[in-house]
Image (cartoon, rainbow, N blue to C red):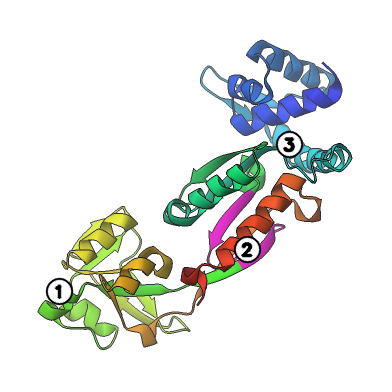
Amino acid sequence: MDRLQALKVFMAVAEAESFTAGARALGLSAPSATRAVNELERSLGSRLFTRTTRRVRLTDLGRGFAEELRDILAQLQAAEDAVSGAAETPRGQLRITSPQEFGRIYIAPLVAEFLDAYPDVSAELLLIDRTVNLVEEGYDVALRIGELPSSGLSAIRVGAVRQVVCGAPGYFARFGRPQVPADLARDHRLVVTGTAQHEWRFRPDRQTVVRFQPRLTVNSVAASIEIARQGWGLCRVLSYQVAEDLRDGRLEPVLEGDEPGPLPVHLVHPQGRRAPAKLRVLLDFAVERLRQLPALRQ
């Protein structure tokens, strides 16, 4: 196996954390992938992976090598695309990640539409409510909600969302509407998602803090919204998650004048101007459609 192919095998195994899965992604057998990595390690004089019976993990040297190599292979792919015509006809696999609810509502249908338009592209979509390290975990692009920390990632803003306290008309008929944030802790049933500290911040400067003991805590945004729809209590969610409910009157917002400032929504990717054709085309496709969503216009 030539050196370039061995490097591609190494990256595939690193991203999959498995010789079998990495080999499958390249259409190779697991023994072929193992031999290629073994030969690469011998030629470099360094161990790139720690192997156990259950998992393959990068060593510290292997992790640094992978980070450098990922950018080099991306540049090489971009050059090959330009010569082969892939810039006009994108091909290959894209790995995409997004928060669960946003991904379920918007990103998954968008990706399916994209794949229909570009039949030579395949995609892996990870919907998870944590910040995925794009470089270390081998993802091409992520949808991020909130202010972005300083990083080497390229970012394209596609809109913004609000943090909304809302409830059903039936709830307000029984318990009334909070007039100021402090009313929430005194007089209302609150449904909280997750195990974070039980406090909500209000006002654009986020200096108004309401601390409370929730009547109900759930680990699902969808469940908290459904409970609010049924009129049991109030929930606080992101505006896109209840856009249809607010539009159709199933839920109504309260304390709108006390909401924190809008949260920006970005698509981020690690490859900058050297992004391969398949990623550039996806970004153009996604940015156009996401910017048209009423739920992201705040």
**Residue 65 percent coordinates (x, y):** 76, 36
Please state which amino acid type lies under the numbered disc 2. Answer: Glu
- Residue 78 shown left or right of residue 115 in the figure: right
Locate residue 255, reporting x and y percent: 32, 83
Q: Residue furthest left?
A: 174
Residue bearing mark 2: 288
User: Which x, y percent locates residue 262?
Assistant: 49, 76
Secondary structure state at the residue bearing disc 1: helix
Highlighted range, magenta: 141-157
Q: Position of residue 94 (x, y in %)?
A: 64, 41
Which residue occupies the extreme top position in the image?
31
> For residue 170, which numbered disc appears in the image?
1
Please name the residue shown 51% across and 21% down the image. 54
Using a 10 Å C-alpha cutoff, classify the residue at mark 2 as few (fewer than 14 neighbours), some (14 to 19) or many (20 or more): few
Sequence-wise first label, 3 or 1 = 3
Mark 3: few/some/many CA within 10 Å (<14, 14-19, 20+)? many
| First reached walking from the N terminus: tag 1 or tag 2 | 1
Q: Is mark 2 on a helix, strand or loop?
A: helix
State the image quarter where residue 28 is shown: top right
SS of the residue at dot 3?
A: helix
The disc at residue 66 is 3
**Is residue 223 in sight in this rendering?**
yes
21 magenta-colored: no
Measured Cα–Cα span from mark 2 to mark 3:
32 Å
Of the residues tagged 3 and 1, which is closer to the observer? 1
Is 271 in front, or is 53? 271
Distance from label 1 to label 2 (Cα)?
Answer: 38 Å
Q: Earlier in the sequence, mark 2 or mark 3?
A: 3
Foreground tag (1 vs 2): 2
